[in-house]
Image (cartoon, helix red, strand yellow):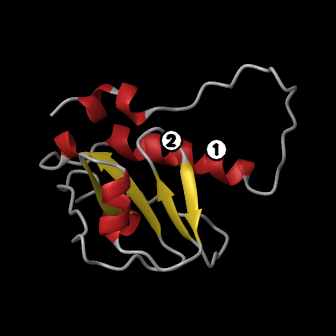
Amino acid sequence: MDNYASCTLTKHSNAIKVIYPNGQIHKLHQPIKAAELMLESPNTFLINSKSLRIGACFSPLNAEEDLEIASIYVIFPMNRLNSVITIADMASLFLVAKSGANRIGSVRILPENAPTPPRLSLEEIEEFSSP
């Protein structure tokens, strides 16, 4: 029997959410094609978070597909294209989604010259950087 883990947010949203390899989450409020995001991030592919299953291979979106409102998409480096989705992949996405959900609706005011806090980078995780 397969294990299943899903990265979904509990609040309904009218935005398209995109998780980038550096851990940033962008909200898009207009329809967009997958190709437009892939052009912004060369050497990457895009996946609907609903298709992520531990032990299954990545199933990237076709470049001409329209992204669906209220869905979450993840951009992965191209070297992961023929890889199997691991527990580490899902754990990383869970942490990014959780930190993003905590930031929504909250505001932090930092001094003008404050150092930028460190961000989670999926590229630093061995499973994300190895073919």
Asked whether residue 90 appears in the rendered view, the answer is yes
Marks 2/1: CA distance? 9 Å
Instruction: Decide which of 101, 75 is in the foreground and name it.
Output: 75
Above/below status of 104 relative to 66: above
The N terminus appears in which quarter of the rendering? bottom left
Residue at image location 40% in from the left, 35% down from the top: 122
Q: How many dots with numbers?
A: 2
What percent of the width, then of the height, locates residue 120? 52, 32
Residue drawn at (63%, 67%) of the image: 10
The answer to whether the residues at label 2 and label 1 have Cβ atoms under 8 Å apart is yes
In this view, the mark in front (2 or 1): 2
Q: Amino acid at mark 2?
A: Gly
Residue 25 on image: x %, y %: 55, 52
Residue bearing the label numbered 2: 23
Q: Label 1 sits on what residue type?
A: Ser
- In the rendered structure, the answer to whether residue 100 lies left or right of residue 73 reads right
Give the quadrant of residue 65.
Answer: bottom left
**Spot occupied by residue 76 in the image (x, y as percentages of width and height):** 31, 47
Residue 99 is tagged as 1
Give the left or right position of residue 116, taking residue 112 as reference: left
| Point 81% across, 20% down: residue | 113
